[in-house]
Image (cartoon, helix red, strand yellow):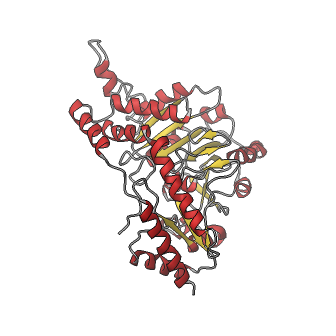
């Protein structure tokens, strides 16, 4: 059976993890700090903070910005539940907006959804394809008069915060700029199935405009990620002062720090990402696109144009004219032929937790979901495996729609 997205765990990663275990630093320590610097350099970000997951990093940012009960945060209806869950965790209201044909949030509908209660927008780079951030900023500017800050941080920014759900998009570019630097704050995911993995984990990349100081913000978030403790373990034990144990907790923070075990995996992954992992993912996606180019029943995803390039995280195809039942039958057939596929995503209004939203208000998301199938893309997927996937999909689509 060809798996869907296994992590790349080889001897280099094993050796680095063993080195970490032997070092005595298994929680947040020197390798986490080194990995953070590597991520910041990779993206061009002033600073990056390693966190335990995209979810915990994103929620920390929303709470720092003061998102609270009664506030509205605009999110796409077509995304994983975490995007909306963190809004709920703050007591705020997720305002869902339909997607466009590229699976990403529809900016025109975002502009229509902005009210005086809107404090933040969370665009999602679905499958690694960047949202149209320039268009999103323009939409916010046109609705600037509605912005009503409720605390000093919001007043300092003076507009709606854009917090990118960049879970899929490390390595992607938009107008020549790397993901991680496309808006105010971006959060990557390093979950086991992502382009770069740390088993679980993520990173917060800072790009806040003046008068914010991003290095000072890094210090703030580093403290917040460790319960608000003013000095982490590394700072304590790196000091030669007698009272190095002394610390304070200025505010009740969170517990969402990255560990050195996670960072050791990520360091290996990031070091070979541009030269090995990303080119291989791109080659696999190009092979799919070429194979399906003449198939009038399969729509392939947008992954490269004059403005942007994907990170090639996912390869979602949509089956023209397929019903939900036909799509499901095609998936079953592909599995029977020894190929694992997936569906990204089930729109939020179809989930029990969000069934107070009506899926009929999100017709593009509903249509995409009914017809989408996500194909395997990962470093160790061989050329023979790619051909097996192509054959299974082609045959199953033909039979499923006949």
Is the C terminus in the top left, top right, bottom left or bottom right quadrant? bottom right
Q: Position of residue 331 (x, y in %)?
A: 47, 76
Q: Is residue 35 above or below residue 87?
A: above
Front position in the image: 349 or 397:
397
Q: Position of residue 220 (x, y in %)?
A: 48, 29
Is the N terminus in the top left, top right, bottom left or bottom right quadrant? bottom left
**Residue at the location (29% across, 13% down)?**
240
Q: Is residue 173 above or below residue 388?
A: above
Q: Position of residue 375 (x, y in %)?
A: 49, 65
**Residue at the location (61% across, 62% down)?**
301
The answer to which image quadrant residue 316 occupies is bottom right
For residue 258, say whether it is visible.
no
Front position in the image: 385 or 147:
385
- Relative to residue 312, is residue 136 drawn left or right? right
**Residue at the location (61% across, 55% down)?**
303
- Relative to residue 10, is residue 40 drawn left or right? right
- Relative to residue 333, is residue 360 drawn left or right? right
């Amino acid at each position: 059976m060809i798996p869907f997205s296994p992590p790349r765990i080889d001897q280099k990663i094993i050796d680095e993890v063993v080195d970490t275990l032997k070092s005595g630093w298994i929680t947040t320590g020197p390798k986490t700090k080194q990995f953070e610097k590597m991520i910041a350099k990779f993206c061009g970000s002033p600073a990056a903070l390693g966190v335990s997951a995209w979810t915990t990093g994103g929620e920390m940012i929303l709470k720092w910005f003061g998102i609270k009960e009664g506030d509205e945060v605009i999110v796409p209806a077509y995304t994983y539940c975490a995007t909306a869950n963190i809004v709920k965790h703050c007591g705020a209201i997720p305002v869902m907006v339909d997607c466009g044909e590229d699976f990403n949030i529809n900016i025109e509908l975002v502009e229509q959804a902005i009210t005086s209660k809107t404090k933040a927008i969370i665009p999602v780079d679905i499958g690694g394809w960047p949202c149209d951030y320039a268009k999103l900023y323009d939409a916010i500017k046109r609705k600037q008069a509605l912005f009503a800050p409720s605390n000093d941080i919001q007043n300092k920014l003076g507009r709606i915060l854009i917090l990118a759900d960049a879970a899929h998009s490390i390595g992607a570019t938009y107008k020549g700029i790397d993901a991680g630097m496309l808006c105010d704050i971006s959060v990557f995911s390093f979950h086991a199935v992502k382009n770069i993995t740390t088993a679980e984990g993520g990173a917060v990349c800072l790009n806040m405009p003046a008068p914010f100081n991003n290095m000072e913000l890094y210090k703030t978030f580093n403290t917040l990620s460790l319960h608000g403790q003013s000095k982490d373990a590394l700072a304590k034990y790196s000091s030669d002062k007698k009272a190095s144990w002394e610390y304070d907790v200025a505010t009740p923070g969170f517990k969402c720090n990255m560990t050195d075990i996670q960072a050791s995996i990520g360091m290996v992954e990031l070091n070979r990402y541009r030269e090995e992992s990303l080119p291989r993912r791109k080659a696999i996606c190009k092979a799919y696109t070429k194979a399906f180019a003449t198939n009038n029943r399969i729509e392939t995803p947008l992954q490269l144009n004059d403005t942007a390039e994907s990170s090639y995280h996912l390869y979602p195809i949509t089956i023209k004219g397929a019903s939900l039942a036909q799509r499901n039958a095609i998936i079953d057939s592909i599995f029977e032929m020894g190929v694992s596929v997936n569906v990204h995503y089930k729109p939020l209004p179809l989930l029990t937790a969000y069934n107070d939203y009506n899926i009929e208000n999100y017709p593009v998301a509903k249509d995409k979901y009914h017809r989408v199938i996500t194909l395997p893309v990962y470093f160790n997927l061989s050329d023979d495996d790619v051909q097996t996937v192509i054959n299974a999909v082609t045959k199953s689509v033909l039979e499923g729609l006949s």
